[in-house]
Amino acid sequence: MNDLTPPTTAHRPDDPAAWWRRPCEVADRLYVSGDLPTDPIGSQRGLAIWLEVGITHVVDLRGEWNSDDVVAAAAPHVVYHHLGTHDDGAAHGQAKGWFTEGVDAITEALADPDARVMVHCHMGVNRAPSMAYAVLLELGHGIEEGLEAIRAARPIAGIEYAGDAIRWHADRRSWTIDEERDAVRRANAWRLANPVDLGWIISKIRTAEDVVDHLDEGVLPSGDVDWDAEMADLPAGEILAEVAQDRAVEAVRQWADLRIADMDGFESLPEEIRPDPDTRIGDLVVPGIVDGLCRLLGVSPEDLDRAVVEGLHEQVEGCLVQGVHIGFAAMASEEEV
């Protein structure tokens, strides 16, 4: 049985920038990565790495860019699918039709035993891992099994759209509402118990991206990169604020799922993912948001007075409770209409 005991802090994998554009095989012949560099030399080198591992199909999920011309010119034998979408976080989610197009293209390609498919977005953190997760569900992997396979192969994967992938799969397989809710709850529980520090990961990759831009311009001195100095030039506050907002909205969604479970078959869930919903949100989500807010303000929770930290926890939990209550009120109003 999986150990779903939550860690005290979100995991920070070693050198996220090194994982950014690394092809990661999450299942047999199914790879996830970040995108090709935009400069001509870098794109050719990146594509050469893909070809070296035998990539025959590319599924590009970026709504903001595509590399169709690069792939067509250098490797015309590679089949290229552009299924661009946004990456606005779990707060906005992904449409079921997007998953259908992507999963169909990928599974049809994998039906050829000689095919190898590269699924990528910009950073390979959320969109591509989430699409790969939908493929694993389609291929028969379990809810937690698929998440574990992706995270094991690609430690920087946040898989923020895992819930959307499950809802798509549930619709495709005609699951009952209870089956869908149970699967989403299990995925939420796994991700809460196995968090990665997305704000930190994204910051590191954006730093590396900024360094690459300097290299293209020929203005970066040779030698070791001063990562701290490079980080200082990034809009870290904006990055952390965006991540904190997405986490807060996703926390409300997860809490609502647990509350629904509390009212509808909650007792049937395994004990390790069946604590009181209020306790779970308090123990797992609130500390993470408080930590993110403190980092956003440039302070450490350890340096604050205990009463101040407790007050922050109460304020955050109060906001989340209010959000859940508003959500249930809206649901009740829709049912009455």
Image: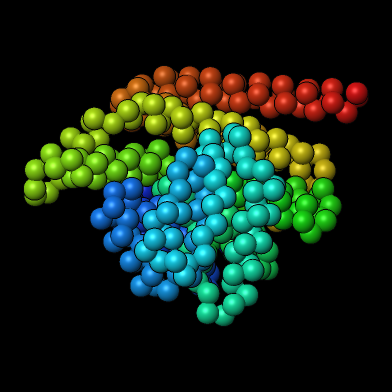
Q: Quadrant of the N terminus?
A: bottom right
- Residue lying farthest to the bottom in this orientation: 113
Identified at 52% across, 79% down, the residue is 114
Residue 160 can be seen, yes or no: no
Identified at 46% across, 29% down, the residue is 242
Relative placement, left or right, of 304 versus 88 is: left
The one of 208 and 311 positioned closer to us in this rendering? 208
- Residue lying farthest to the right in this orientation: 336
Picture quadrant where residue 303 is located: top left
Residue 223 can be seen, yes or no: yes
Identified at 77% across, 56% down, the residue is 172
Residue 331 in percent (x, y) is at 80, 28
Q: Is residue 57 above or below residue 83?
A: below
Q: Is residue 60 above or below residue 230?
A: below
Q: Quadrant of the C terminus?
A: top right
The one of 222 and 328 positioned closer to us in this rendering? 222
Identified at 39% across, 56% down, the residue is 70
Relative placement, left or right, of 232 versus 270 is: left
Q: Is residue 332 above or below residue 131?
A: above
Residue 92 in percent (x, y) is at 61, 34
Relative placement, left or right, of 116 versus 52 is: right
